[in-house]
Image: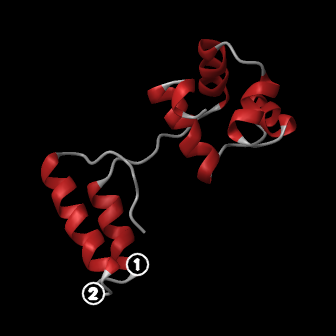
Amino acid sequence: MTTKLKAKSRIFAAVHETAADLHRLGFIDKRKMRKFDALCLDPVPAYDSEKIRALRDHLQLSQAVLAAVLNTSLSTVRKWEIGDKHPSGPSLKLLDLLDRKGLEAVL
């Protein structure tokens, strides 16, 4: 249940690490661990159509290449960029990773 997101501070990182260990040992259930995740970790930002397009332009990728990098379909990337759909789950986290670390971090 531990998440590899950046903690809000060193103190929050220590609290989250302790909670994750307690969860792993069975002293904290999933619901309580989600509360610690929300409290201690910065959430993944939302990506709207403009932000996805800007990221793709910055990385100099076509829609097809971005779809391949994110392991999604070309039509999904197209729908994201026109605003019909919004990324979620693993795609959202990969977009955030691309934005923060660049293409080399994903490949």
Say which residue appears at 74% left-offset and 43% top-offset.
71
Q: Amino acid at mark 1?
A: Arg
Q: Residue at x 64, y 45 (%)?
A: 91
In which quadrant of the rendered view does residue 36 lie? bottom left
Nearer the observer, 25 or 56: 25
Rendering quarter of residue 75? top right
**Relative image position of residue 77 (x, y in whole percent):** 77, 34
- Of badges 1 and 2, the one in the foreground is 2
Up/down of 51 relative to 88, above or below:
above
Front residue of 104 and 5: 104
- Element assignment for label 1: helix
Residue 20 x, y percent position in the rendering: 30, 70
Residue behind mark 2: 27
* Residue 40 spot, x, y in % from top left: 26, 56
Using the numbered discs, state the Cα–Cα distance from disc 1 to disc 2 in whole angstroms. 12 Å
Q: Residue at x 27, y 48 (%)?
A: 7
**For the image shown, how many numbered marks are present on the structure?**
2
Numbered disc 2: secondary structure: loop
Against 5, residue 1 (above or below) is below
Quarter of the picture holding the N terminus: bottom left
Reading the image, the residue beneath label 1 is 31
Q: Residue furthest right?
A: 75
Tell me how the rendering is colored: secondary structure
- Which residue is located at x 54 percent, y 44 percent? 93
| Mark 1 nearby-residue class (10 Å; few <14, some 14–19, many ≥20) | few
- Position of the C terminus by quadrant: top right
Q: Residue 73 vs residue 2: left or right?
A: right
Name the residue at the bottom extreme: 26
Q: Position of residue 101 (x, y in %)?
A: 46, 28
